[in-house]
């Protein structure tokens, strides 16, 4: 079996700037940068790598060629990869692609070079980043605005914006905390900008990265907040609820770092929770789902016996109930 190398921080030729890849993290597509690609294996740099042994759906595209493939994660970079290697990431092997997917993969490999390709240089990171969707307020010398942070780390955050602030802009950042505590206030500067052209080329969100100064009581509170996000990042939760509750509950868990999938049908729930060899860490069943599918609990209890997945009834009609259960169960400090 061919095992691709771990992501490297060494610059490499940008042989195909249009080479793009994503992988599913819960129900969300997570962007990644391809560091190595062959007809059987791939290595990527990304925030929030999956777990070794996970089965992932991946999307690869270059120019007008696109394919979707299942892969098994073979190796994951260590926690200090951002500092040592320049980025976190993982390597994987493609699992039994169908004829069409295999042909499309071969076309992509041929486009970017048959010898195994490294197509993009990843900027070095001082700390591992964790995907979120979290509100933050940013102020600068001539104004302020409310934004959404798409990832957080112990050294900063990435802000989604179609009008990024210029590099080196000094900013004041206010971050609300997940436990209802007072906002933390941090000084920072814009360290990098990802404009619309660069974002469009890689099918990402435009925005800007802020490097923050960690000091004092607020700095300590921010560090504890990021540590909670980091802990949640390790767990995958499937939520089963009727449609009107499902989106809000999935968003609640995804926004604070959990990899979250949703299901409003029994067959979808079975597929997302038990069709793969390594399932989620927990399945949350809302009362609305159980009333719609009364056979749910009995069927799932039988399936759960075959794997270490927790099955729990949660009343998702109360905001914060799903988060409170998950944090308590998974030991989020």
Image (cartoon, helix red, strand yellow):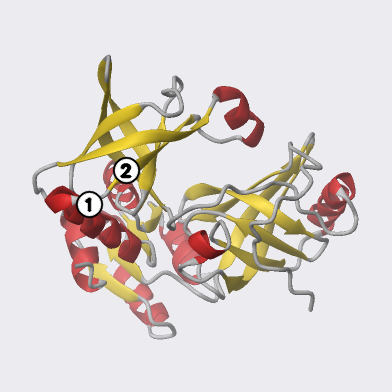
Verify CB contact (< 8 Å) between mark 2 and mark 1.
yes
Q: Residue at x 57, y 47 (%)?
A: 123
How far apart are labels 2 and 1 at the CA level?
A: 10 Å
Q: Residues within 10 Å of mark 1 (few under 14, many from 20)?
A: many
Residue highlighted by disc 2 = 212
Which quadrant is the N terminus positioned in? bottom right
Q: Helix, strand or loop at disc 2?
A: strand
Instruction: Report x, y in % for residue 269.
Output: 42, 61
Q: Residue at x 71, y 48 (%)?
A: 60
Residue at the top extreme?
142
Q: Residues within 10 Å of mark 2 (few under 14, many from 20)?
A: many
Instruction: Report x, y in % for residue 31.
Output: 56, 46
Q: Residue at x 75, y 50 (%)?
A: 12
- Closer to the observer: label 2 or label 1? 2
On screen, residue 86 versus residue 171, left or right, reads right
Residue highlighted by disc 1 = 222
Residue 141: mark in rendering: none
In front of the other: 279 or 36: 36
Instruction: Report x, y in % for residue 152.
Output: 36, 48
174, above or below 33, in the image: above
Instruction: Report x, y in % for residue 16.
Output: 79, 40
Which quadrant is the C terminus positioned in? bottom left
Q: Is residue 257 visible?
A: yes
């Amino acid at each position: 079996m061919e095992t691709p190398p771990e992501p490297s921080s060494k610059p490499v030729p940008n042989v195909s700037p249009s080479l793009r890849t994503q992988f599913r993290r819960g129900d969300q597509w997570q962007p990644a940068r391809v560091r190595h690609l062959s007809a059987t294996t791939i290595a990527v740099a990304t925030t929030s790598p999956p777990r070794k042994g996970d089965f992932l759906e991946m999307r690869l595209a270059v120019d007008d060629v696109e394919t979707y493939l299942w892969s098994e994660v073979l190796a994951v970079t260590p926690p200090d990869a951002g500092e040592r290697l320049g980025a976190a990431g993982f390597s994987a092997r493609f699992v039994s692609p169908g004829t069409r997917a295999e042909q499309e993969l071969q076309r992509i490999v041929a486009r970017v070079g048959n010898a195994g390709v490294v197509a993009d240089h990843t900027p070095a990171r001082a700390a591992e980043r964790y995907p979120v969707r979290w509100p933050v307020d940013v102020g600068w010398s001539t104004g302020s605005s409310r934004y959404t942070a798409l990832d957080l780390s112990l050294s900063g955050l990435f802000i989604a914006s179609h009008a990024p602030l210029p590099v080196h802009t000094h900013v004041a950042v206010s971050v609300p905390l997940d436990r209802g505590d007072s906002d933390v206030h941090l000084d920072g500067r814009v360290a990098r900008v990802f404009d619309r052209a660069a974002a469009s080329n890689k099918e990402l969100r435009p925005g800007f990265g802020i490097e923050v100064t960690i000091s004092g009581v607020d700095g300590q509170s921010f560090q504890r907040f990021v540590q909670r996000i980091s802990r949640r990042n390790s767990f995958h939760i499937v939520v089963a609820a009727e449609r009107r509750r499902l989106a809000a509950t999935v968003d609640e868990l995804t926004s604070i770092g959990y990899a979250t999938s949703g299901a409003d049908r029994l067959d979808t729930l079975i597929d997302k929770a038990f069709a793969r060899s390594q399932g989620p860490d927990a399945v949350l069943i809302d009362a609305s789902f159980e009333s719609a599918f009364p056979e749910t609990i009995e069927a799932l209890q039988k399936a759960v016996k075959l794997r270490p997945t927790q099955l729990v009834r949660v009343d998702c009609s109360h905001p914060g109930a799903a988060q409170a259960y998950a944090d308590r169960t998974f030991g989020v400090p």
